[in-house]
Image (cartoon, rainbow, N blue to C red):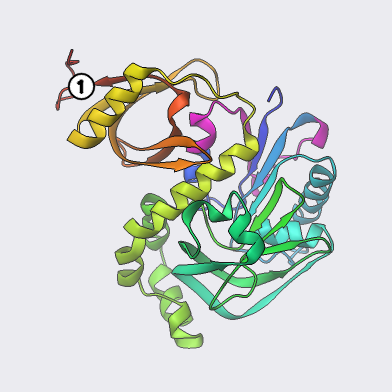
Amino acid sequence: MSKPILIIQHAPHEPPGILIRMLESQGTQYLWICPYNGEKYPDVANISGLISLGGPMSANDETSHDWIKPECILLKNSIRAGLPVTGICLGGQLIAKALGGSVEKNHTAELGWHRIFLTKIGLMDPILSAAGNDPLVYHWHNDTFLLPPDGELLARSEACERQAFRIGEAAYAFQFHPEADAQLVYQWLSAQETDDEIRRAIKANNERSVQDQITQRYYTSTGEQSSLRITAAIGALFRDKPSTRLDPAIVQIAEEAQTGNADVLLTFHGSGGLGVGLTGKITGSFILSSFKFLVFQDEKNSLWPIRLDDVTGLKLISKDLTQALK
């Protein structure tokens, strides 16, 4: 894509998580803005897609957040123009509002790792079905969206009847957080006043829908695997790079590294086109739409879903990460 994908972050503690690593690994250019800091939205003619992230504010609170109305206009224009658009939690609610739906309080808060259940349409959807029929995914919300006209419901949960919807083939709204891995969840759980917020939520709501910190941490290693697969599938929306022939040497090294739990140096083009090199481990792999993805954990313990044909180089390296092995 010659124009960048726009990433909209609504709060300092709500970064794109796995999503930014997905874009980076497949070489997709992006523009990352924070409207709460006064940064302006670009014109829809200057972007090739849009990702709207979560936030603690209400989508209905236009008085306190003057960026909500212009973002809704941008979302509406982007979807009308046929651009790929993804909204997460608050971002999904803003999509609903922009297209004629609405946002209201859910009957209970939903916080922690909970399963979603796919509708008949969701079971056939290439993104929602990426992690199976009832994947364990992360939630942190009090509000919920009501679908706009032409919205197709893709998933529900025990605590929330509307977890995801689709408009056309390229616009998606998620109530849950597909970008959340252990690193991001632990960051949220470590934030000041989180314990008090969770205790208040447990007291005021259905205890089954709000997990305490111990429970959330227990399920994180399982839940983040769903996040990786769903995020990898989202990547196809924002991808214009054609598939390339797999290098047999890279395929062989990837298999050896995964089997032997070895350290590797992995390289890919990156969003800037200058090449990115990472050291870490290949901790797993999965197949989506006939493409193989590596689960790569870098030295900072960040997880990357990297499509194998995007890998430009792969070397086994010694345990001290200094001497390459032949």
Q: Position of residue 254 (x, y in %)?
A: 30, 28
Residues in magenta? 21-45
Q: What residue sits right under mark 1 in the picture?
A: 317
Answer whether residue 139 is magenta in the image: no
Would residue 63 be found to the left or right of residue 250 on screen? right
CA neighbours of label 1 inside 10 A, class few (<14), some (14 to 19), many (20+): some
Q: Quadrant of residue 253?
A: top left
Q: Nearer the viewer, residue 252 or 9?
A: 252
Would residue 73 be found to the left or right of residue 19 on screen? right
Q: Amino acid at mark 1?
A: Ile
User: Measuring 81% from the left and 57% from the top, which residue is drawn there?
Assistant: 98
User: Measuring 62% from the left and 60% from the top, which residue is drawn there?
Assistant: 122
Q: Position of residue 96 (x, y in %)?
A: 75, 61
Say which element carries label 1. Answer: loop
Residue 51, relative to residue 161: is it above or below?
A: above
Q: Quadrant of residue 191?
A: bottom left
Q: Is residue 105 visible?
A: yes
Query: For the C terminus, which image quadrant?
Result: top left
